[in-house]
Image: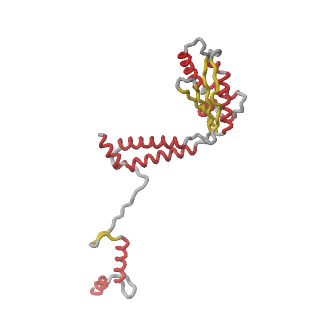
Amino acid sequence: MEFSDFLKLIKSKKGTILTLVFIVVLFTIGLSLTSPLKYGAESRLLVAQDTAGNDPYTISKSNEYLGNLFAQIVYSASFYDLVLESPYNVDKNYFSGAYNKQLKAWQKTIDTKTISDTGIIEINIYHQNPYQAQQISLAVNDILINKNAYYHGNNQTTKINIIDQPLVSSYPVKPNLIQNLILAFVAGLLLSLFYIYLFPERRYDLKLWSIKKKSPVKSLGGAIKLEDYTGDRNAEQKENENADGSNWPEGDINNILRQ
């Protein structure tokens, strides 16, 4: 199909496109509203090493490597165990069930990323209770600062410093409804374009609503309403009613009398 033909198809399938986009957006809203609301606690750490006698470029690359390493280690089972064993007031009942389910809940609780080659690690904790989000964030930072040597052998020159202490959001940040709606709109639009491309026939059109077209009765004087036409017929029948209350037309009675 040529691009010009596809543009014409889009114009003729606006109803189908709007219907699919509406369905995807509505489904996303329902899914977002049924998800538990979570607060966020964000902190930033800096991986730093002793630069004495070392090439600054090599140190920069080493910091980048360690930053990416620590950003992935926090998802591990061993790190999760250290968080639960920390002196902070972390609610262990929140991570309930079998151990693999606990790890899945933990991996949904924490989110990390590194900033380019700076060695800076951003750590976000999400929890339904803002106090718990803060406590978990403090435990994660404490482990990375004081026990990072468990995950590498260079404990003499590698240090992790806190740039920003955990800052807890004033309102729930998950699910992000605005972001979800934007993604749902884009996904619905792409899905609808793919759908009309595969099924361009009219019988595959989708519409959530239908418009009923009126079929006016035409006469010599133009279009008249159906109820007016019915009213005229009723009036004509009333004129043909007999004095005894029967509603037979006079023509039918005369034919009977002639027989």
Question: Is 55 located above or below residue 98 in the figure?
Answer: above
Q: From where the camera sits, is residue 258 visible? A: yes
Q: Nearer the viewer, residue 12 or 69?
A: 69
Residue 35, given in percent of the width and then of the height, sits at 58, 42
Give how far across and how far down residue 150 sits, in percent.
64, 19
The picture places residue 203, in percent across and down from the top left corner, at 35, 49
Task: Using the rendered view, name the quadrant where residue 157 is placed.
Answer: top right
Is residue 29 or residue 47 the one in the foreground? 47
Q: Quadrant of the C terminus?
A: bottom left
The correct choice, above or below, for 211 with respect to 76 in the image is below
Q: Does the rendering let one see residue 1?
A: no
Q: Quadrant of the N terminus?
A: top left
Q: Nearer the viewer, residue 97 or 83?
A: 83
Choose top left, top right, bottom left or bottom right for residue 66.
top right
Q: Position of residue 163 (x, y in %)?
A: 63, 28
Query: How are the residues colored?
Result: secondary structure
Is residue 221 left or right of 68 when viewed as pictured? left
Q: Is residue 192 left or right of residue 52?
A: left
Residue 106 versus residue 37 in the image, above or below: above
- Furthest residue in direction top, as rendered: 53
